[in-house]
Amino acid sequence: MKSKKGLTLIELLVVMAILGLLSTVAFSQYRTSQQKARDAKRKADLDNIARALEMYYNDNQSYPTASLDGKIMGISWGSEFSKTYGTQTVIYMKELPKDPAANWHYCYESNGSYYKLFAKLENNKDPSYNPSGYSCGGDNTYRYGVRSANVSL
């Protein structure tokens, strides 16, 4: 009697289907974890910027004003946030953080008496995700914000 070695076509198809299903689940979990990580960075960035704004306020008794494009005093995201007082320059942040997504940016709003900072979030299941969004610079796709204590979002 001849022994049969190997797998039948049906067995191979079942194994391939199981592997495909497992890889799909693993990829979706990986993608979700990446979104959560980027959102956590956005929140931490806004908290750090808020601390720098409060230091600026302590020195100037006002917050820096916003430019029309949603930047702090027109400073590009990724540049140094500083101010020169006479001959001394005070650095509030060595580098204003950039959004982890290359084509997104944070948005800043201020008239000097208050500030609001906004970020776009990817994970719509995040507890701080605002589905109705915040408007900043004419864009209402910002889903997370921080603010000075004297104003509401």
Image: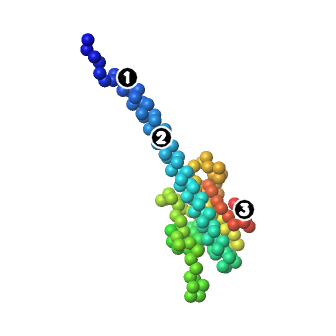
Q: Which label belongs to residue 26?
A: 2
Of 32 and 137, nearer the camera is: 32
Please report the residue visible at 44 percent of the width from the left and 38 percent of the height from the top: 23
Could you give the CA–CA distance between mark 2 and mark 3, rounded to whole angstroms? 40 Å
Image vertical order of residue 31 relative to residue 139, above or below:
above
Label 3 neighbour load within 10 Å: few <14, some 14-19, many 20+? few
What is the x, y in percent for residue 59? 66, 79
**In this figure, which residue is indicated by the disc labeled 1?**
10
Which secondary structure, mark 1?
helix
Can I make out residue 138 in this image?
A: no
Please report the residue visible at 53 percent of the width from the left and 61 percent of the height from the top: 99
What is the x, y in percent for residue 97? 53, 65
Instruction: Answer with left or right where residue 26 lies relative to residue 86.
Output: left
Image vertical order of residue 77 relative to residue 30, above or below:
below
Which is more N-terminal, label 2 or label 1?
1
In what quadrant of the picture does the N terminus appear?
top left
Of 19 and 124, nearer the camera is: 19
Could you give the CA–CA distance between mark 1 and mark 2, rounded to whole angstroms? 24 Å
Point out the residue furthest to the right here: 150
Which is more N-terminal, label 1 or label 3?
1
Please report the residue visible at 42 percent of the width from the left and 33 percent of the height from the top: 19
**In this figure, which residue is indicated by the disc labeled 3?**
152
Could you give the CA–CA distance between mark 3 and mark 1, rounded to whole angstroms? 62 Å
